[in-house]
Every structure is written in C-alpha cells, then in structure tokens.
Amino acid sequence: MDPFRNIQSKHLSIVLSFARILCFFSMLAFIVILLGTIFSPFIGFPILYFIWFIGIPISGFILSALLAALVAFEEGFRQRTERILTGKQDPA
C-alpha cells in the first residue's frame, strides 16, 4: 500500500515522504486501537483506554492529508510556472 501514490514532487519530496510515513503509522495505530477496543474485554483492559487514543491516528491522517495537499498544490504551481517561463500556453 502506497498512500498518495499519484502525487510526485520535485522540490518537496521530503515532505511527501513524511506524509506517507505518517499516514502509514497512523493506519497501524488505528488498527491496533481498533483491535484493542474489540479484544479489551478478553484481555482485561477497559475499552476507554483504547478509545482515548483514537484522536492520535485521526490527527495523523489529517496532518498527512494536509501535507500531501500542500505538496500537490506546490507541484501544480511549479509546473504551471515552468510552462509560462518556457513560453507554452497555459491550458487553464
């Protein structure tokens, strides 16, 4: 699985890599919290211990999506600027 597979960047590739890694770890944390919530009665933990931490992966998803949107916007702006500077007509 490769989150944000269609986004590529020339200048902000580190930010895009961070967004992908953050999304991956948020997915792992969400799965662990989900499994912990399901199996908590069987292992002896209260369900609220796991539900309290659900905001962490959700925040990670939101932050990674915002970073990916920033990278996509910057890449589109860069490509448009390169077209203008090379003299080609902007289709938009």
Image (cartoon, helix red, strand yellow):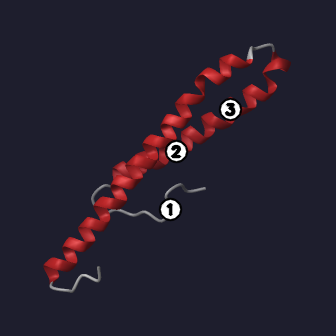
In the image: residue 70, left or right of residue 62: left
User: Which residue position is annotated with label 3?
Assistant: 32
Residue 17 percent coordinates (x, y): 42, 50
The single residue placed furthest to the bottom in the displayed view is 88
Q: Which of marks 3 and 2 is nearer the N terminus?
A: 2
Residue 38 percent coordinates (x, y): 79, 29
The single residue placed furthest to the right in the displayed view is 42
Q: Would you say residue 10 is visible in this rendering?
A: no
User: Which residue position is annotated with label 1?
Assistant: 5
Q: Quadrant of residue 72?
A: bottom left
| Label 2 SS | helix
Q: Which residue is drawn at 29% across and 83% down?
A: 91
Q: What residue type is labelled 3?
A: Val
Above/below status of 83 relative to 31: below
Which labelled disc corresponds to residue 23?
2
Separation of disc 1 and disc 3 at Cα? 24 Å
Q: Which amino acid does label 2 sit on?
A: Cys
Q: Would you say residue 15 is visible in this rendering?
A: yes
Q: In which quarter of the image is residue 26?
A: top right
Q: Earlier in the sequence, mark 2 or mark 1?
A: 1
The single residue placed furthest to the front in the displayed view is 92
Separation of disc 3 and disc 2 at Cα? 14 Å
Q: Which amino acid does label 1 sit on?
A: Arg
| Label 3 SS | helix
Residue 84 or residue 27, whichever sits in front: 84
Q: Which residue is drawn at 45% across and 48% down?
A: 65
Residue 74 percent coordinates (x, y): 28, 60
| Label 1 SS | loop
Residue 75 percent coordinates (x, y): 31, 64
